[in-house]
Image: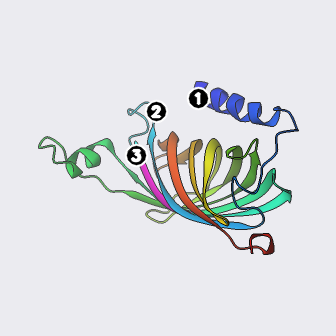
């Protein structure tokens, strides 16, 4: 819970910054944008209750400006895989380790993204995870985060972010297997709207 409160505090700080902070066209593409990329994360909870410690994901994100140059509506879709600590150890050649089944999910989230200057932003998304591996129930997920967008051309940018994500995924026995984790994201973003032409 401490990480949840910390994440909420960091995100709220972005929303109470002075309204005079503006995003210039040199900072990131304006108008509608589409991003593609990958992320990886790790859990920070007790392994005794949630053994799936590592997450890797490929994802896409769409942004639509609500308040020009400051606030964007976001929608993201991802394919996520969760691995146990033992499986990761096995991948890296630890002789005392063994493989365990990976869990695969499709994630869908919507939310908002607030730019507080030319590059820095805070965001908050919520949505659902759908299991592809087992017949687990669809679970609600929520995700506050912060990031930086670096322009590389007039309508393109590299987006680096870090976020907290809260899950409550349970297995068939009612045990929580995925609960909460921190994730680092790298996206390639480009303009697709008329403002980016």
Q: Which residue: 16% across, 43% down?
A: 94
Residue 14 percent across, percent down from the top left: 75, 35
The residue that disc 1 covers is 3
Q: Could you say which is closer to the camera, residue 14 or residue 149?
A: 149
User: Crowding near pointer 1: few (<14 within 10 Å), some, many (20+)?
Assistant: some
Could you tell me which secondary element the residue under label 3 belongs to? strand
Magenta span has 56? Answer: yes
Could you tell me which secondary element the residue under label 2 belongs to? loop
Q: Is residue 37 left or right of residue 20?
A: left
Q: Give the number of the disc on residue 54.
A: 3
Q: Could you say which is closer to the camera, residue 24 or residue 174?
A: 24
**2 and 3 marks in contact (CB < 8 Å):** no
Could you tell me which secondary element the residue under label 1 belongs to? helix
The quadrant where residue 108 appears = bottom right
Dividing the image into 4 quarters, which one contains the N terminus?
Answer: top right
Q: Start and end of the magenta stretch? A: 54-59
Residue 70 percent across, percent down from the top left: 81, 50
Q: Give the number of the disc on residue 44.
A: 2
């Amino acid at each position: 819970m401490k990480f949840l409160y910390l994440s909420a505090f960091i995100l709220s700080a972005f929303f109470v910054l002075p309204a005079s902070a503006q995003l210039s066209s040199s900072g990131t593409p304006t108008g509608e944008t589409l991003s593609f990329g990958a992320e990886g994360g790790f859990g920070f909870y007790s392994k005794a209750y949630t053994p799936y410690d590592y997450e890797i994901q490929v994802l896409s994100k769409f942004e639509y400006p609500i308040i020009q140059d400051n606030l964007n509506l976001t929608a993201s879709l991802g394919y996520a895989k969760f691995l146990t600590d033992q499986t990761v150890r096995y991948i890296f050649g630890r002789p005392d380790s063994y493989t365990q089944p990976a869990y695969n999910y499709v994630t869908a989230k919507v939310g908002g993204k607030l730019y507080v200057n030319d590059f820095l932003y805070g965001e908050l998304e919520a949505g659902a995870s759908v299991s592809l591996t087992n017949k687990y129930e669809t679970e609600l997920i929520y995700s506050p985060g912060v990031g930086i967008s670096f322009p590389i051309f007039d309508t393109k940018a590299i987006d680096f972010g870090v976020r907290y994500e809260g899950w409550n995924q349970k297995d068939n026995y009612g045990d929580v297997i995925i609960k909460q984790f921190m994730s680092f994201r790298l996206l390639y973003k480009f303009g697709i709207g008329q403002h980016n032409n």
